[in-house]
Image: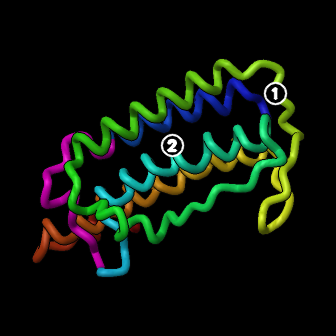
Amino acid sequence: MDFNTATSHLQKNAEIIRMLVQDIEDEQARWKPTPDTWSILEVINHLYDEEREDFREHLDLILHRPGQPWSRIAPGGWVTERQYNTRDLAKSLACYLEEREKSLKWLADLKGADWSADYETPWGKLRAGDMLASWVAHDILHMRQLVELKWAGTLKDMAPYEVEYAGEW
């Protein structure tokens, strides 16, 4: 893994996420295709909390504080506990982007990090490089989720007309 490539992906991914959601109307931001799925607003607030309470925090733990306990996170529960879907999308997006900038600055300040350093998590060993790679991949998983939400919203908005002519999804 190349550190500069990973941080470049993190920077570009944040820009893609911004472009995917920046002009979404409030109703569309809160809309969920089913009660069990997340809205666009919930995805953005999840990314915000993961940015400040998970990836940066846990990577720092692996690299610099291996004896300290792994902090508890509950990303699925936070969606309802923290009432993500009641928040403002523009503000939520700005908070996420601000946290990503903090993360990028923090990563840029890492000098001589040992990417093979590992930490014994509750589910097994996790290397610092695994955490950074997972951070990049996590963005992409949620970029896919945002595109799927936009697709489902488009189908809803275009009804009763069909979109088959566009191509297979």
Crowding at mark 1 (Cα within 10 Å: few <14, some 14-19, many 20+): some
Where's residue 30, x and y in %?
21, 62
In the rendered image, is residue 127 in sight? yes
Where's residue 108, x and y in %?
64, 20
> On screen, 157 above or below 91?
below
- The quadrant in which residue 98 appears is top left
Label placed on residue 113: 1
Per the image, the residue denoted by label 2 is 52
Furthest toward the bottom, the residue is 35
Q: How is the image coloured?
A: rainbow
Where's residue 31, x and y in %?
21, 67
Q: Nearer the viewer, residue 70 or 9?
A: 70
User: At label 1, which amino acid type do we have?
Assistant: Ala
> On screen, 46 above or below 17?
below
Q: Which residue range is magenta in the image?
A: 20-34
- At a point 79% along the width and 37% down the height, the residue shown is 63
The nearer-to-camera label among 2 and 1 is 2
* Image quadrant occupied by the C terminus: bottom left
In the figure, is residue 127 to the left or right of 30? Answer: right
Element under disc 1:
loop
